[in-house]
Image (cartoon, grey):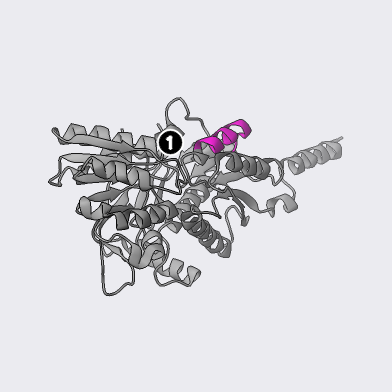
Amino acid sequence: MQRRTVLIAILALLLLVPPAADAQKPIKVGFPMPLSGPAALYGDPALKGAQLFVEEINAKGGVLGRKIELLARDSKANADEAVRVSRELILKENVDFLVGTLTSAEGPAVSVVAKENKVVFIAPIPKTDQLTAPDKLHPYIFRVAATTTMEGRSIAEIVAKWNVKRIATISFDYAYGQDVTRAFVEHIKRIKPGVEIVDQQWPKLGEADYTPFINAQMAKKPDAVFSSIWGGHFLTFSKQAKPLGYFDAIKYNLIGAGEIASPEATKAMGAEYPVGVWGNSYDAFYWQDAPPAHRDYTARLSKFLKDDAPSSWSIQTYMAMQFLVEAIKKAGSTDSDKVAKALLGLTVDTPHGKLTIRAKDHQANRGQLYGQTARDPKYPFAIMKPMTYVDPTKFMD
């Protein structure tokens, strides 16, 4: 009888302990991201940032004794495609988590998929306020990017110091463009009474011919322009605007959201870049005032990419993976519910210093670098000179 009791106890313990084979299975992270078309200018280096992190963490033995496996899929910057590949990653590939998407159309769409399947989804790039708005927030969505409110208000603070009164805007007519433009306009009116919004142009995302929008805006004679045209789209826009005298007409008083001053954007345009405009970037390899951790990260990224002037976008997915791994460690589990709880209020030492995901809205206090573009004999492309890291904390509520 005693022997039988011992055997039953041993069997019960064995049932509680996962098989060794399961313990050795990789932790799968689905990674939907635009890897083709104009958006790949940002999407491809974003993938590289996640790959660098995975390579580094796996070299240290992984997390909870398990390696991480990154499963990347091309979302094509399309919400429907992002949803399709995300569902496929969850249902067919059995991924444990999702990290990814780039546009503010993709992010909210994939968030719904994450909610339906109760899978933690960390968005490293989409900025639209709608992603974590009170009526859209759910236990499984988290963001390490800035929001449109944070970005729009940060830019308004810069423009408020300019000697301009007649301001125009040009942004894509979808969530990101609408939200960031609204945040900019509302804040500039609040902090600089007397400014006039003389024109607003709304080309569709992926517009091929900006000429009608450019001519219509120039006819209103603005002193300055706020733009949120981004990536390869800004390259197309600028090539059409420059010969029309657009930048000269506004004395280069254009400030672009959407990271138009990132190394990717300025390198891609080369001599065709409208040097003198203002822009922002999540990161810059030439950031002199960066924390020491940033210099170390930049050196590793440069070696990984085999590029002395590495990407600014890799930092976002690198940070997203940092948050995910630290939450897994804190939870001591890959269970999404436990990891989701561990992410609430979590602070992580990133290459940009300590960042925290707030519990109340699942939003990280992620700022950006801002500055006017200029030529520098060290580089064959424009850089921000000088540039300033803007702490977004006061713009988050």
Q: To which residue does mark 1 refer?
A: 175
Q: Left or right: 194 with respect to 217?
A: left
Q: Secondary structure at mark 1?
A: helix
Q: Residue at x 15, y 36 (%)?
A: 192
Towards the viewer: 232 or 314: 232
Magenta stretch contains residue 268: no
Looking at the magenta stretch, what is its main secondary structure?
helix
Query: Is 144 situated left or right of 30 in this image?
Result: left
- Towards the viewer: 283 or 185: 185
Looking at the picture, tell me which residue is in the foreground, 25 or 262. Answer: 262
Horizontal and vertical percent for residue 117?
63, 34
Number of labels in the image equals: 1
From the image, which quarter does the N terminus lie in? Answer: top right
Please state the extent of the stretch shown in magenta in the rendering: 108-119
- Relative to residue 245, is residue 185 depicted above or below? above
Query: Is residue 253 toward the left or the right of residue 7 in the image?
Result: left
Q: Residue at x 83, y 41 (%)?
A: 7
**Image x and y of residue 193, in percent:** 14, 33
> Around disc 1, counting alpha carbons within 10 Å, would you say few (fewer than 14), some (14 to 19), or many (20 or more)?
many
**Was residue 112 drawn as part of the magenta stretch in this picture?**
yes
Classify residue 396 by image quadrant: top left
